[in-house]
Amino acid sequence: MASLSKDSSLPDYSEFIQRIYGMPNDRFYTLWDMLDNVQRFSMRCVKGIRKNNVEKTKHNAMIAFSWYTSLTNRLHINVDNAVWNRFPYLCSYCGEAPCVCQAEKVKARRKVVGKKSLKPRSVHDVQIMFARIYPPGTRTSEHAAIHLAEETGELSEAVHLYMSDRSKKYFKEVSIEAADYLSCIMGVLNSIGIDAGDELSRMFYNNCHDCHKLPCECTFRHVCNYRS
Ligand SMILES: [Zn+2]
Ligand SMILES: [Zn+2]
């Protein structure tokens, strides 16, 4: 049996998703199918915000996060490093925590230098880091959802560009957009007061969150029709 705890790290999570879903992902899903599912569940999460439905928002955010991890696993992106390189406990644009992009009308990206000793260890700590950089009290949950939609599009665009020439340059872009996407999933969860570490341990207490098998035995059709 495989499970996650409240203190699981991003590498623990990537490894867990690989154990449970690596085989069905390789057999059933192309990179595009996985990207499609990231988009599908991200948009369901956005809908949850519009409907003011915390349960729907949370559940779809966690499933989007899971598909995102399958996608980054397929591309062998180290999400933990990608996030830290982009957000070293500081905003990736203004280089401050909390972010001053709006207040100071920052027009150009500043040099961002973080302290390695602050690197978060668990998913829970990564979420806290994002709450410090982008305090949820300074924006509405709708704003957080719009930002998630925007970054979902940018991740998709980066994957398309990378697949058009498979160059190092565009692979780097995918890593950057993957970090931005994760910051927005955390942003939405922060805006509705949900702890990702708690949710992961609740959802993945026993293998796949749906069929509870290792590896997952959910059929392709079942996943296509999955509603939450
Ligand atoms: Zn900023
Ligand atoms: Zn399953």
Image: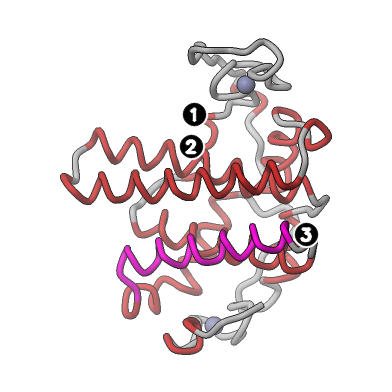
Secondary structure beneath disc 2?
helix
**Which residue is under mark 1?**
85
Image marks 2 and 1: residues in contact by CB distance under 8 Å = yes
Q: Quadrant of the C terminus?
A: bottom right
Mark 2 packing: few (<14 Cα in 10 Å), some, or many (20+)?
A: some
Position of residue 107 in the picture relative to residue 78 (left or right): right
Q: CA distance from mark 2 to mark 1?
A: 6 Å
- Residue 207, how many percent across, how many down? 60, 77
Name the amino acid, label 1: Asn
Q: Label 3 vs label 2: CA separation?
A: 22 Å
Residue 99 picture quarter: top right
| Three-letter amino acid code of the residue under disc 3 | Asp
Q: Is residue 38 magenta?
A: yes
Q: Locate residue 161, reporting x and y percent.
A: 26, 44
Relative horizontal placement of residue 142, taking residue 95 as reference (left or right)? right
Q: Specify start and end residues of the magenta stretch as a single range.
A: 29-50
Task: Name the disc covering residue 81, or none.
Answer: 2
- The residue at which mark 3 appears reads as 198
